[in-house]
Image (cartoon, rainbow, N blue to C red):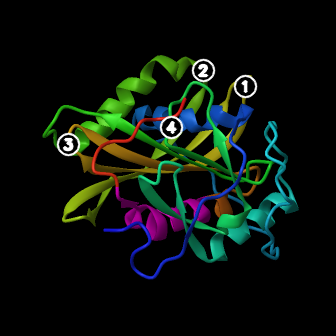
C-alpha cells in the first residue's frame, strides 16, 4: 500500500535532526515493559480547564526537560484535539499519524538507534520514537516485545522506576495482529523525576524484524491529560501505522 494511501495527507516534519538530552525518556519505552506487576496509583487531581494551544516555535537546538504548568497542559490539550497528519521517516519506509504534526521537531536519541524521533515543542511535551527490532524468522509476534525487554534490561539501573502496566491488547494490521503495550511510570532518579504515560506497538512488518512505534508523555502534575494523550495514540495512531518498505530499513544512530 502506498504511504499516502487512503486520502491521508503526509509530510516530513522539520529540517533539523539533533540529539537532545531528553533522549533518556525514549529508553523508558523499552525499560517500562520490564516492570513486574502493577503498583497502586493515587487518585490524580482533576485537570484545570485550559484552552488547547501548540507550543512555541521549536528552534531545533538541544534542550533539557521543560517545566509543567499551564503551557504544558495547553500543549497536551492541543494533542488531544488537533487533526492528525501523516509523518514519514526520512527513508520513507513508514508513515505514522501525528496530532498537530507541524509543531513537532525531528530529534535523535543518544545511544538509541532509531528510524524516527520526534519531540513536541522544545520543552518536550511529548516524544515519539520508532525503531526496528530484529527477531528470529517466523517468530510469533510476542517475540518482538520479549527481545525489546532483553535489550533494555542492562539499562534498568539508570532509573528508579515504578510501573503500572495495563493488559496487552492486539489489533488487526495487514491481515495479521499487532500488539499494544500501555503503562504509566513514575521515575525518581537523579536524572529525572516525573510521571510518564507510555504506550508502544509492535508490528510484524518484515521477515526476521518487527517495527516498534512508541510515545511517552510526561505528566508534570497533569497526569489525566498525559494519560488522555497517550490513549489517543493508542486508539487513533498506533493501529494505523503504514509500512511501505519491503525490507527492514537501516536505523539511524
Residue 190, compared with residue 139, is above or below; it is above
Q: Answer with mark 1 or mark 3, whichever residue precedes in sequence.
A: 1
Q: Is residue 228 magenta?
A: yes
Q: Earlier in the sequence, mark 3 or mark 4?
A: 4
In contact (CB < 8 Å): disc 3 and disc 2: no
Q: In this image, 227 relative to 237: left or right?
A: right
* Most frequent secondary structure within the magenta stretch: helix
x and y percent of residue 18 in the render? 71, 37
CB within 8 Å, label 3 to label 4: no
What separation in Å lies between label 3 and label 2 (alpha carbons)?
A: 33 Å
Q: Residue at x 63, y 31 (%)?
A: 24
Q: Which residue is mark 2?
A: 158
Q: Nearer the viewer, residue 188 or 128?
A: 128
Residue toward you, 169 or 130: 130
CA gap, disc 3 to disc 4? 19 Å
x and y percentages locating residue 54 in the rendered image: 79, 67
Look at 20% across and 42% down and name the residue there.
207
Secondary structure at badge 4 equals loop
Is 209 contained in the magenta span?
A: no
Mark 2 surroundings: few (<14), some (14-19) or many (≥20) residues within 10 A = some
Q: Which residues are magenta?
A: 227-244
Rendered image: mark on residue 114: 4
Query: CB of mark 2 within 8 Å of CB of mark 1?
Result: yes
- Distance between the alpha carbons at the discs numbered 1 and 3: 38 Å
Marks 1 and 4 sit apart, C-alpha to C-alpha, by 22 Å
Q: Which mark is residue 207?
A: 3
Mark nearest the camera among 4 and 2 is: 4
Task: Identify residue for label 1.
Answer: 191
Say which element carries label 1. loop
SS label for mark 2: helix
Q: Earlier in the sequence, mark 4 or mark 2?
A: 4
Q: Residues within 10 Å of mark 4 (few under 14, many from 20)?
A: many
Amino acid at each position: 500500500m502506498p504511504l499516502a494511501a487512503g486520502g491521508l495527507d503526509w509530510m516530513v516534519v522539520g529540517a533539523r535532526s539533533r540529539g537532545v538530552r531528553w533522549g533518556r525518556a525514549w529508553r523508558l519505552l523499552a525499560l517500562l515493559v520490564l516492570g513486574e506487576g502493577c503498583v497502586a496509583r493515587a487518585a490524580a487531581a482533576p485537570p484545570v480547564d485550559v484552552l488547547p494551544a501548540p507550543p512555541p516555535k521549536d528552534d531545533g537546538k538541544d534542550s533539557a526537560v521543560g517545566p509543567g504548568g499551564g503551557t504544558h497542559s495547553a500543549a497536551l490539550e492541543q494533542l488531544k484535539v488537533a487533526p492528525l497528519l501523516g509523518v514519514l521517516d526520512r527513508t520513507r519506509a513508514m508513515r505514522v499519524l501525528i496530532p498537530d504534526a507541524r509543531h513537532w521537531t525531528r530529534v535523535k536519541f543518544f545511544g538509541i538507534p532509531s528510524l524516527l524521533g520526534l519531540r513536541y515543542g522544545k520543552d518536550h511535551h511529548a516524544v515519539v520514537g520508532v525503531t526496528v527490532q530484529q527477531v528470529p524468522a517466523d517468530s510469533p509476534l510476542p517475540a518482538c516485545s520479549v527481545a525489546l525487554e532483553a535489550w533494555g534490561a542492562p539499562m534498568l539501573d539508570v532509573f528508579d522506576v515504578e510501573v503500572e502496566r495495563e493488559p496487552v491488547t492486539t489489533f488487526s494490521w495487514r491481515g495479521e495482529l499487532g500488539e499494544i503495550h500501555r503503562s504509566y511510570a513514575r521515575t525518581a532518579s537523579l536524572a529525572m523525576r516525573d510521571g510518564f504515560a507510555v504506550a508502544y506497538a509492535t508490528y510484524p512488518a518484515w521477515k526476521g524484524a518487527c517495527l516498534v512505534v512508541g510515545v511517552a508523555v510526561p505528566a508534570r502534575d497533569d497526569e489525566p491529560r498525559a494519560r488522555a494523550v497517550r490513549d489517543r495514540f493508542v486508539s487513533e495512531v498506533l493501529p494505523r501505522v503504514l509500512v511501505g518498505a519491503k525490507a527492514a530499513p537501516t536505523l539511524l544512530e
